[in-house]
Amino acid sequence: MTPQKVAVLGTGKIGEALLSGMLRGGWSPSRLLVTARRPERAAELRERYGVEPVPNAEAAKSADTLILTPKPQDMAALLDELTPHVPAGRLVISGAAGITTGFIEQRLPEGTPVIRVMANTPALVDEAMSVISPGVHATETHLALADEIFGGVGKTLRLPESQQDAATALSGSGPAYFFFLVEAMTDAGIQLGLPRDKAHELIVQAAVGAATMLRDSGEHPVTLRENVTSPGGTTINAIRELENHRVRAAFIDAIEAARDRSRELGA
Ligand SMILES: NC(=O)C1=CN([C@@H]2O[C@H](COP(=O)(O)OP(=O)(O)OC[C@H]3O[C@@H](n4cnc5c(N)ncnc54)[C@H](OP(=O)(O)O)[C@@H]3O)[C@@H](O)[C@H]2O)C=CC1
Ligand SMILES: O=C(O)[C@@H]1CCC=N1
């Protein structure tokens, strides 16, 4: 079942990433609606993508699938605005961290199918990971529709909603950890006297090469890392320092903290 019309409500960074991916994937702008809180943002979206910005109520009435991408803190207000206008049977997909399908179901007409999705910004280059969980009224047909929409901007994975806060911490936030690592490694290059642009180029290519090997070689990351680590060589000196600074433990703590924040946002 392909939806006739999809609306993205609260079109900020992640909403725009999804919208641009849908257009790249061949969706006609006439089948897409967007909503924004500020007129200048609405104008920006119209100009960039040729899509029609509409009020939230109109999107709720005229699109058969509603994708809600406001910040979690703005979700309740958006739902209050939408609820009187959502006809029975609309599929509602939430892209917000922490917000549960139950939170949304309680505020929408009884029986509304709701799906929770945690995507990430590599949607901009069709390399997103979108983790998909159904609410109580979402059927396999609804899930297939979410797969179709989010599958257009990368991979999709279905997980039970009980694992969404963990997925948010790992995958939704995940690209930020890699960007942070690139920043830190570039600073190391500066410390060693390399020009910033050259250090950046070296690190980005190492990241792209390593990511491609992780995805395509079928090898375990430990094997890939051991293959770089020559006995008595340079890499083991760096690994020793990373272990001395408890970088592995820091990642575990950091991702646990992100998971906890996702839980708080949904509480
Ligand atoms: N950024 C990311 O990497 C990811 C974000 N997410 C989730 O996506 C959601 C959005 O995050 P992000 O895109 O970064 O945030 P943004 O602030 O960029 O986007 C949210 C947008 O929603 C708009 N908005 C808020 N309330 C309303 C309303 N009532 N009607 C219309 N528009 C409204 C905001 O308007 P205004 O501009 O006026 O504030 C803003 O443009 C969050 O829930 C987040 O958890 C999920 C995965 C990854
Ligand atoms: O930082 C955040 O809250 C959002 C959710 C996942 C990525 N960005």
Image (spheres, helix red, strand yellow):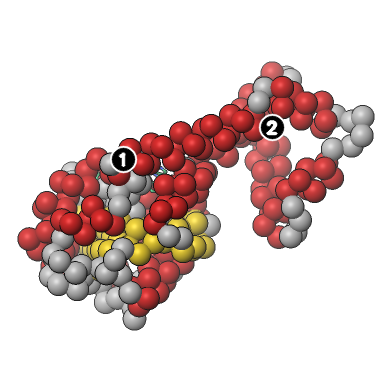
Where the C terminus falls, by quadrant? Answer: top left
The local crowd at label 1, few if under 14, some if 14 to 19, many if 20 or more residues have their Cα within 10 Å, is some
Q: Residue at x 33, y 38 (%)?
A: 264
> Does the beta carbon at disc 2 come under 8 Å from ligand 1?
no
Q: Amino acid at mark 1?
A: Leu
Instruction: Determine whether the residue tagged by mark 2 lies in a helix, strand or loop.
Output: helix
Quarter occupied by residue 40: top left
Q: Is residue 225 left or right of residue 73?
A: right
Q: Is residue 46 left or right of residue 163?
A: left
Residue of label 1: 265
Residue 47 higher or lower than 7, as above or below: above
Q: Nearer the viewer, residue 18 or 175?
A: 175
In the image, residue 138 sits, relative to residue 161, either above or below, namely: below
Please give the count of numbered marks on the rendered protein: 2
- Front residue of 103/173: it is 103
Find residue 134 and report its horizontal and vertical position in percent: 35, 64
Farthest residue toward the bottom?
1
Q: Position of residue 87 (x, y in %)?
A: 12, 70
> Does the beta carbon at disc 1 come under 8 Å from ligand 2?
yes
Looking at the image, in which quadrant does ligand 2 appear?
top left
Q: Earlier in the sequence, mark 2 or mark 1?
A: 2
The answer to which quarter of the image holds residue 262 is top left
Residue 64 makes an appearance in the image: yes
Report x, y in % for residue 147. 42, 69
- Marking on residue 198: 2
Which class describes the residues within 10 Å of circle 2: few (<14), some (14-19), or many (20+)? Answer: few
Q: Residue at x 30, y 44 (%)?
A: 266
| Circles 2, 1 touching at the beta carbon (< 8 Å) | no
For the residue pair 187 and 227, the one nearer the viewer reads as 227
Residue 9 visible at all: no
- The residue sitting at 58% across, 29% down in the picture is 250
| 191 displayed left or right of 227 | left
